[in-house]
Image: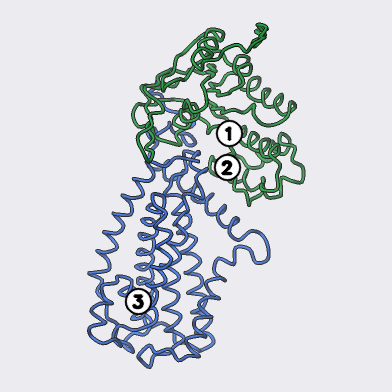
Amino acid sequence: MASQVPQNAQDSAPPNTSYGRSLGESLSVQRRVIDALLRREMLTRYGRHNIGFMWLFVEPMIFTIGVTILWTSTKSIHGSDLPIVAFALTGYSSVLLWRNMPGRCIGALQANLPLMYHRNIKVGDIYTARLLLEFGGATISFTGLSVLLIAAEWMEPPDDVLKVFAGWLLITWFGCALAIGLGALSHMSELVDKLWHPFSYLLFPLSGAAFLVVALPQFAQDIVLWIPIVHGIEFVREGFFGSRARAIYDLGYLIPFNLVMSVVSLIALRYVSRRVVPE
Amino acid sequence: MMRVRDLRKVYRTRFDDNLVLDGVSFDLAMGDRLGILGRNGAGKSTMIRLISGAERPTAGTIETSMSVSWPLAFGGAFQHQLTGFDNVAFISRVYRQDFERNIAFVEQFAELGPYLREPVMTYSSGMRARLAFAISMIIEFDCFLIDEISAVGDARFHDRCNYELFEKRGDRAMIIISHDAAYVRDHCNRWGVLHDGKLALYDDFEVAYADFKKLIGWKPPPGWMELQVSTA
């Protein structure tokens, strides 16, 4: 009798297993769960008041505009004659992308523990929904502001849009892998939450958002290029400025780094998923 | 049919390992209503959580061809900033259920009136219990896990819960945990006593209850007049 296929397998696989479900069915369950989590997350975070979910991208836009104004007015030393508006936009948008993802995933499981009673909802789904939201918000903010600034002629259109997009995805990959790893670890130790804030704050000036690698002295370049995210931002900038700026990056460092970090993060996710105790 | 075999659960605490379940086995068929008695901390809720799939056992297997509910009476994964309405929408999406039909049922059962569209954090505990129970009823599971539902709500609410569970869904399997022995006696047809990580099974409530009282060291207080739980 135990081998019977569940009558309504789409909604209720047996506990602890997912047998009796094809890959297609599993994918459709997961899509539905992530869709439900996304809507729930948007309602919880932004509510139905004033501009509602538009805060998703308005908030990062305000941040980026503020930083752009600040850097323009202080003539921030970025070590080249590049237009500062485009420099600030590419730099700060990237920071928002990789920094907010871990910020949203750390402690996310703790806040959503009751959801673990629904066996279709997995730990990874909670992170996925939050990462999709962060990616959406940062991407809409980045592209929206780019279009606006280009239309207002404060900025030239990017030299190579595809390259910008590819760089953006590499930074997203870095952010997601870091976020899932730190999110899972934060469930095991609260130290992660405590240390992430100073760490991300210190990483910001080192991340390449506020300088071009080429403008640094050689010994500083050697140090800074150990930080993987620098390569991503340099790549985005190359897409934006083309030959007007010399970008220094090595995808042969960033991509393997992302790969290894993804594997480590998924192991941590699996470890936590197997041990999670709902409330 | 559900087959639970040699279920073990060990929680690691800071000082040593805490063995909560030590080889629990039983079968449960449709129509079986298994009432579990056990003192505080005996592992009743842990057992329910393992069966619901919310947690993994340290060892042992749970095989089932039934769809199993989440533990009823627990909040139903409310997001407290969201309205009752939004919470129903969330559950309907996760379980692919017809939202219009569900919201109509919740409106009628939970009797929240305009509060259905207010955040759950503004609800009284009775209102939360009604919403939680109504949400649990919108998905037609084969097996319901019921963790101390008699602890909340008023008599009218209990009557309506009992109607929904035992009249309308009398053909389903259930596992019921309660400290209210009369509730377990009246609504179950099989009983179990959970003690020291082991589950003993009974077909007669009086035998189960007598063993349970012995295990927890229950002694009649002075002047006790054979009142007990009346078996009418």
Residue type at tag 1: Ile
Image coords of residue A56 (percent x, y): 55, 65
Q: Is residue B118 above or below residue A209?
A: above
Q: Chain of mark 3?
A: A
Chain given the colour green: B
Q: Quadrant of residue A156?
A: bottom left
Residue occupying the far right of the picture: B113
Residue type at tag 3: Leu
Label whose residue precedes the other's in the sequence (2 or 1)? 2
Q: What is the secondary structure assignment of the residue under circle 3?
A: helix
Task: Please name the color used to draw chain A.
Answer: blue
Residues at marks 2 and 1, CA–CA distance in whole angstroms: 9 Å
Residue type at tag 2: Ile
Q: Count residues near mark 1 (Cα–Cα under 10 Å), then give few for <14, some for 14-19, many for 20+.
A: some
Residues at marks 3 and 1, CA–CA distance in whole angstroms: 52 Å
Q: What is the secondary structure assignment of the residue under circle 2?
A: helix
Which residue, given by chain and number where applicable, does mark 1 sit on? B139
**What is the tally of numbered marks visible in this picture?**
3
Compared across the picture, whether B31 is left or right of A187 comes to right
Image coords of residue A72 (percent x, y): 48, 89
Q: What is the secondary structure assignment of the residue under circle 1?
A: loop
Residue A206's disc number:
3
Which quarter of the figure is the N terminus of chain A placed in?
top left
Please give the name of the residue rendered at 43% of the width and 60% of the height, measured from the top-left corner.
Answer: A194
Residues at marks 3 and 2, CA–CA distance in whole angstroms: 44 Å
Q: Marks 1 and 3: in contact by CB < 8 Å?
A: no
Which residue is at the front of the view, B218 or A253?
B218
Compared across the picture, whether A222 is left or right of A167 comes to left
- Which circle, 3 or 2, is nearer the viewer? 3
Which residue, given by chain and number where applicable, does mark 2 sit on? B91
Residue A33's disc number:
none
Q: Chain of mark 1?
A: B
